Every structure is written in C-alpha cells, then in structure tokens.
Image (cartoon, rainbow, N blue to C red):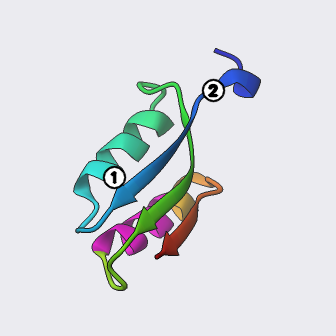
C-alpha cells in the first residue's frame, strides 16, 4: 500500500502501553501497514505516553500524544 493510502489508526490506552508498543514496533517493522498519528489516554501519567514518545524519537515518527 502506498504512503498516501495507509490507514490512520489512533491508539486509545490507559495503562503501561505494552500493547501500543507492540503495535508501533510492528508498524515500524512493516508488519502492520498503517500510520499512527495519535495516541490518547485518560490517565495523566500513563506509561503509554512515555513509551510512545520514546518509540517516536527512536524511529523518527510523528506521533502526537494527548491526555483527555
């Protein structure tokens, strides 16, 4: 699938972020053909925020994180 047609997936999480991490790393490894522009949590200090920021930095991904 071309970059212009990759599905965009938002991740909703409230915990440590291990599932989000697995999804993001599968995406980086081209095992998942999608783009994740947004990770949202309802927990202010959820581990998923730090995990996502770390993965985004290491792999030069543009992922916005937000707490609602």
Q: Could you say where residue 38 lies in the image, as x and y percent from the top left?
A: 55, 56
Q: Could you say where residue 55 lies in the image, as x and y percent from the top left?
A: 46, 59
The first of marks 2 and 1 along the sequence is: 2
Q: Residue at x 23, y 68 (%)?
A: 15
In the structure shown, which secondary structural element does the residue marked by tag 2 occupy?
Answer: loop
Please indicate whether residue 55 sits to the left or right of residue 16 in the image: right
Furthest residue toward top: 1
| Label 1 sits on residue | 21
Is the residue marked by circle 1 packed among few (<14), some (14-19), or many (20+) residues within 10 Å? some
Please indicate whether residue 39 sits to the left or right of residue 43 in the image: right
Q: Residue at x 28, y 67 (%)?
A: 14
Residue range in magenta is: 47-55
- Does residue 28 lie above or below 37 as drawn? above
| Label 2 sits on residue | 6
Q: Could you say where residue 25 lies in the image, as x and y percent from the top left?
A: 39, 43
Asked if the stretch drawn in magenta spans residue 45, the answer is no
Furthest residue toward front: 68
Q: Residue at x 33, y 84 (%)?
A: 45
């Amino acid at each position: 699938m071309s970059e212009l047609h990759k599905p965009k997936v938002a991740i909703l999480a409230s915990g440590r972020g291990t599932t989000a991490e697995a999804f993001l790393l599968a995406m980086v490894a081209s095992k998942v053909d999608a783009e994740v522009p947004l990770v949202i949590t309802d927990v202010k200090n959820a581990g998923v925020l730090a995990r996502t920021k770390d993965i985004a930095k290491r792999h030069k991904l543009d992922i916005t994180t937000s707490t609602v």
